[in-house]
Image: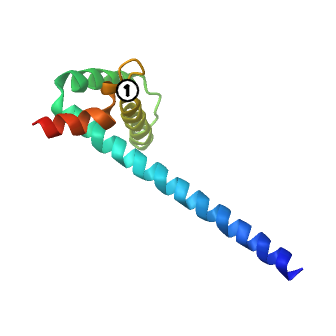
Amino acid sequence: MLVHVLLTLLTLVGCALLLVLRLYWLEVSERNHLIDYAGQLLLFDEVRISHEKEFDNFLRASKATNWQELHYRAGFAIARMANRLAAGDPKNPASSSVLGFPAAAWQR
């Protein structure tokens, strides 16, 4: 009986540890995507202009009822744009900000 309880407890601790590690990895990935996204916006005018228009369209189409809701939704929209730029165009792997920003920064 004691062995069964210990194995169950060990399994729960292991699952909790895996969950924490997965959440940490997601947070680090999102942070890196946002850094690469900011770098792309600072280095490449065509990216900045395109995303500025997209974000402006998002703001105009938003159904937010107050500034706090708009701020919350805008944060998610920016994160989505950063993740999309990080993924890049499947037909052009060099378009990923994860690869593009460090390479462009290194060349300068």
Crowding at dot 1, Cα within 10 Å, few <14 / some 14-19 / many 20+, comes out as: some
Residue at image point 46% right, 33% down: 64
Quadrant containing the C terminus is: top left
Residue 86: % across, % down:
37, 34
Residue at image point 38% right, 31% down: 81
Q: Is residue 55 visible?
A: no
Q: Who is closer to the viewer here, 35 or 50?
A: 35
Residue 91: % across, % down:
40, 17
In this rendering, would 6 be left or right of 83?
Answer: right
Give the structural element (helix, strand or loop) at label 1: loop
Residue 10: % across, % down:
71, 72
Q: As drawn, which residue projects farthest toward the left?
A: 108
Residue beneath label 1, please? 88
Q: Who is closer to the viewer here, 92 or 39?
A: 92
Task: Name above or below for residue 55 compared with residue 36.
Answer: above
Kind of residue at disc 1: Gly
Residue at image point 36% right, 27% down: 59
Residue 7: % across, % down:
78, 72
Quadrant containing the N terminus is: bottom right
Task: Name above or below for residue 71 compared with residue 44.
Answer: below
Task: Name above or below for residue 58 compared with residue 16.
Answer: above
Q: Is residue 73 visible?
A: yes
Q: Who is closer to the viewer here, 99 or 72?
A: 99
Residue at image point 78% right, 77% down: 6
- Residue 97: which quarter of the image? top left
